[in-house]
Image (cartoon, rainbow, N blue to C red):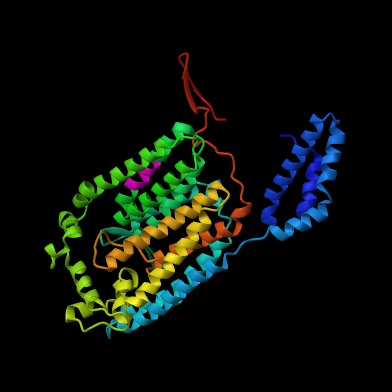
């Protein structure tokens, strides 16, 4: 569609009146499209091109007045309620970490120093990550969809080469910060990495469907090998919801059955991994699989922690500290390193009652409810994809965390968003929250770009008529 110079100048004059510069591109496009439509209507009525153009500009009105009116409606939407919820949960987590300092046994200076580092180093870093991502243009992940997957691949390569073995995983240590990067926490970035590639594949028909399924399978296998099974679960949940929403909204042409098939295929792969791959890869795999369903079957082995947690929770009351525990159970509630990351809700429930942990869960549920409501109202495809992906990642974390803290030991949790203070998990969760709220703040003016194929139609290497041709174009 050709746009005249007069229309360009008019749109620029309108945009000069709008203080929110991020909205300029979308507004200019809408103004030029509207002027062009009006011009075409006058041309169809028999006017000459110059007369039609002049009438279209006159009908639109004074550009300064139009721009001033649009300035009142085109403003960032900060979503103060959700920002307040994130910060409330973040501060509440900090308070809990201070309380956990009291549980550190006397003489355990290493654990005390580590807890102090979490409070005075990683809390400020996490808050900075939240603010930085909040003001980042979230469209970066759509315009450059390969950056995050390549960074994750590079991390895993470096971790495999130079990482430290801890719990059967390779942790990468950054000595200057004293930060040990958890592969479990890093797995939370894979859904967002997949989202950018998934967005680029839309409108590619059956090829797009096939590539989406292959990418999802590769991500799952990579997560199961280099990270944790909880990361696989989180990814499948997030990617599965994204695929089903894309199918319902017909983002990939007008076909739906293929997405349902891919989702069922992903669930099938998960079952296969759970039943066959995980038991052979991890030590005591079959025993762990058995105690998922019957933890009391091995109370002193793989079902020990689950059994002890259930016993602890049976001593809890509605408000206040629970009944006295045995020496073994009391010791579990003084292990600050474990409570800080994996069993924060169990600690809260025993020391402050079911009401305290219920309030925490309720705050998280309100955050997710508001988030999903806002995400489904996003006008752009990519804005909706990113927000749904991040919210599903948070949801999967919570759905893994709560059963583990109730003694229903399905699988080791990753983190409780904004509250549990594994350093890497807290940084990533706060960064993801920043990206989510960045979508809500500026998503109104984001315009989806034309879809591009992952692979160009032109071939780099061609064989025809007995000749090998290499094209560098």
Q: Quadrant of the N terminus?
A: top right
Rendered residue at 39%/59% (across/down) = 395
Quadrant housing residue 400? bottom left
Q: Which residues are magenta?
A: 215-221
| Between 90 and 184, the one nearer to me in the picture | 90
Rendered residue at 84%/35% (across/down) = 52
Residue 448 coordinates in the image, percent (x, y): 59, 45
What secondary structure is the stretch in magenta mostly built from? helix
| Between 65 and 206, the one nearer to me in the picture | 65
Residue 71 relative to residue 404: left or right: right
Residue 127 relative to residue 5: left or right: left
Asked if 155 appears above or below 264 in the picture, the reply is below
Residue 46 coordinates in the image, percent (x, y): 84, 28
Asked if 58 appears above or below 309 in the picture, the reply is above
Quadrant housing residue 284? bottom left
Rendered residue at 28%/43% (across/down) = 268
| Between 221 and 327, the one nearer to me in the picture | 327
Residue 149 coordinates in the image, percent (x, y): 44, 48
Asked if 150 appears above or below 396 in the picture, the reply is above
Q: Residue furthest top?
A: 465
Let me know if residue 429 is in the magenta part: no
Let me know if residue 217 is in the magenta part: yes
Residue 290 relative to residue 373: left or right: left
Asked if 239 appears above or below 121 in the picture, the reply is above
Residue 86 coordinates in the image, percent (x, y): 48, 69
Rendered residue at 78%/49% (across/down) = 12
Q: Quadrant of the C terminus?
A: top right
Residue 17 visible at all: no
């Amino acid at each position: 569609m050709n746009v005249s110079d007069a229309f360009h100048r008019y749109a620029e004059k309108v945009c000069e009146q709008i203080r929110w510069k991020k909205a300029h591109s979308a507004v200019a496009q809408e103004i030029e499209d509207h002027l062009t439509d009006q011009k075409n209507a006058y041309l169809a009525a028999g006017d000459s091109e110059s007369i039609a153009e002049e009438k279209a500009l006159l009908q639109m009105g004074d550009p300064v007045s139009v721009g001033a009116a649009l300035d009142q409606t085109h403003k960032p939407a900060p979503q103060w309620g959700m920002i307040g919820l994130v910060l409330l949960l973040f501060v509440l987590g900090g308070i809990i970490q201070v309380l956990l300092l009291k549980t550190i046994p006397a003489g355990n200076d290493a654990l005390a120093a580590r807890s102090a580092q979490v409070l005075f180093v990683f809390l400020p870093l996490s808050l900075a990550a939240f603010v930085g991502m909040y003001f980042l243009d979230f469209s970066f992940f759509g315009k450059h969809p390969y950056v995050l997957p390549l960074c994750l691949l590079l991390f895993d390569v470096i971790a495999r080469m130079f990482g430290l073995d801890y719990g059967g995983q390779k942790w990468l240590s950054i000595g200057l910060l004293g930060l040990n990067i958890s592969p479990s926490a890093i797995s939370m970035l894979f859904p967002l990495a997949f989202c950018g590639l998934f967005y680029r594949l839309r409108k590619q028909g059956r090829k797009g469907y096939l590539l989406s399924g292959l990418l999802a399978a590769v991500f799952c296998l990579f997560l199961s090998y280099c990270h944790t099974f909880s990361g696989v679960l989180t990814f499948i949940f997030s990617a599965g919801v994204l695929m089903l929403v894309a199918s319902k909204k017909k983002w990939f042409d007008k076909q739906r059955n293929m997405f349902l098939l891919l989702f069922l295929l992903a669930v099938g792969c998960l079952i296969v991994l759970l039943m066959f791959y995980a038991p052979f890869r991890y030590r005591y795999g079959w025993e762990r699989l058995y105690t998922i369903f019957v933890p009391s079957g091995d109370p002193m082995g793989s079902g020990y922690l689950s059994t002890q947690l259930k016993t602890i929770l049976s001593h809890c009351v509605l408000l206040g500290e629970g009944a006295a525990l045995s020496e073994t159970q009391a010791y579990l509630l003084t292990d600050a390193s474990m409570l800080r990351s994996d069993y924060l809700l169990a600690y809260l429930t025993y020391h402050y009652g079911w009401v305290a942990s219920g309030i925490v869960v309720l705050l998280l549920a309100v955050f997710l409810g508001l988030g999903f409501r806002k995400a489904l109202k996003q006008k752009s495809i990519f804005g909706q994809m990113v927000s749904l992906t991040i919210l599903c990642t948070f949801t999967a974390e919570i759905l893994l965390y709560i059963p583990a803290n109730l003694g229903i030991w399905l699988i080791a949790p990753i983190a409780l968003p904004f509250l549990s203070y594994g350093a890497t998990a807290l940084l990533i969760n706060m960064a993801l929250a920043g990206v989510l709220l960045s979508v809500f703040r500026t998503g109104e003016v984001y315009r989806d770009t034309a879809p591009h194929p992952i692979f160009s139609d032109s071939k780099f290497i061609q064989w025809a008529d007995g000749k090998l041709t290499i094209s560098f174009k």
